[in-house]
Image (cartoon, grey):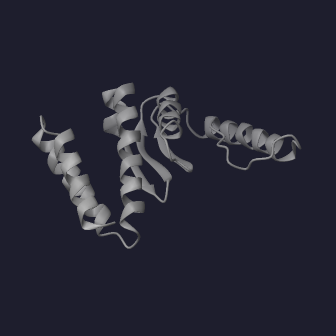
Amino acid sequence: MTLPRLFAALALAAAASACAPSALVASGALLTRSVFQERATLDALTDTEIAFGVQHRLAKHSGELYRDVSVDVVEGEVVLTGSVPRRADRIAATKAAWDTPSVIAVSDALVVAEDGGTSAYISDVRLANQVRYGLITDTSVRSINYTVTV
């Protein structure tokens, strides 16, 4: 990325966060982190843009989801971590990530606080594996880019 484009991106971040000084500091920190990664600055900035997009969608859904879910993006692949109170929140977070432009893959490492223990976990794993098996053996499904969430 050329130096003028870098300054333009920093100016855009400053203008977008003019009414919130803390947002300006956060934008500057993310931009700086993007520049110093060991890959093309434009790729790192694209990942930063994706992370902002996912976080914005989480905040639109609920403040708790925004607070409880951490978003990391590398080369368009989003990793969601944290703990959410309900399964519906986990699904909403995953959907928010997939709905963000330029996302290639989503890894859901969220923990649901209301889970029912070992027996519920075993039941969920069995059901998820049945669905995965059905997808793999179905000749009309041509893509391997899908996520099974139970």
Q: Which percent across, then down, holds residue 28? A: 19, 54
Relative to 122, 95 lies left or right: left
Which residue lies at the image location 60% right of the left edge and 40% below the top edge? Answer: 118
Relative to 128, 5 lies left or right: left
Q: Say which quadrant the N terminus sits in.
A: bottom left
Total number of numbered discs in the rendering: 0
Please tell me whether residue 84 is drawn above or below residue 51 in the rendered image. above
Displayed quadrant of residue 61: top left
Given residues 102 and 56, the one toward you in this image is 102
Which residue lies at the image location 48% right of the left edge and 43% below the top edge? Answer: 110
Please tell me whether residue 122 is drawn above or below residue 76 in the rendered image. above
Q: Say which quadrant the C terminus sits in.
A: top right
Furthest residue in direction bottom, as rendered: 38
Which residue lies at the image location 51% right of the left edge and 38% below the top edge? Answer: 94
Q: Which percent across, then down, holds residue 60? A: 36, 27
Displayed quadrant of residue 129: top right
Which residue lies at the image location 73% right of the left edge and 41% below the top edge? Answer: 126
Please tell me whether residue 130 is drawn above or below residue 59 in the rendered image. below
Q: Which percent across, then down, holds residue 93? A: 47, 35
Q: Which percent across, then down, holds residue 34? A: 31, 62
